[in-house]
Image (cartoon, grey):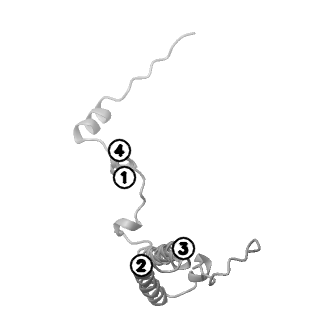
Amino acid sequence: RRVHGDTRLPKMVKVKAHEIRNKAPKELLKQLDELKTELSQLRVAKVTGGAASKLAKISTVRKGIARVLTVYNQQRKDGLRKDFKGKKYQPLECRAKMTRTLRQRLTAAQRLKKTVRAEKKAQNMPLRKFALAA
């Protein structure tokens, strides 16, 4: 009889995001390769009729790969943001996402700018002020 919590299966080491955030990008890529080879071995075991524990481990390994890739991509983006901070042009992935309409709208300076004709008209024919008697 099994006691609750004691499954008698080899313990699966779960990749934890807070642990891999401290690693360097090269270490992350190395860990990613290890996880991918482990996944391929588990898939072979699945085809050849491996143990149930191996089949259950496939999902944890896949999630581990996802976590490593997430952390790697976040670190890469943070590095890009630091490199391009204060520069005139930035890579697309560092720019503010917003919506297409918001990204393409005119800047405040462009909105307030007048044509030569409108400027002449405003200068030569200012708005008239009328004093109203109460």
Mark with earlier residue (1, 4): 1
Q: In x, y percent, where is residue 62?
A: 48, 74
Establish if 95 lies above or below 13: above
- The residue that disc 1 covers is 103
Report the mark closest to the observer, 4 or 2.
2
- The residue that disc 4 covers is 111
Report the mark closest to the observer, 1 or 3.
3
Point out the residue furthest to the front here: 1
- The residue that disc 2 covers is 43
Establish if 26 lies above or below 134: below
Give the CA distance from mark 2 to mark 1: 45 Å
Q: Amino acid at mark 1?
A: Arg
- The residue that disc 3 covers is 56
Residue that appears at 35% across and 50% down: 100
Give residue 20's mark: none
Give the CA distance from mark 1 to mark 4: 14 Å
Mark with earlier residue (2, 1): 2
Mark with earlier residue (3, 2): 2
Mark with earlier residue (3, 4): 3
Mark with earlier residue (1, 3): 3
Mark 2: which secondary structure? helix
Mark with earlier residue (4, 2): 2
Residue that appears at 49% across and 17% down: 131
Position of residue 108 in the picture relative to residue 13 (left or right): left
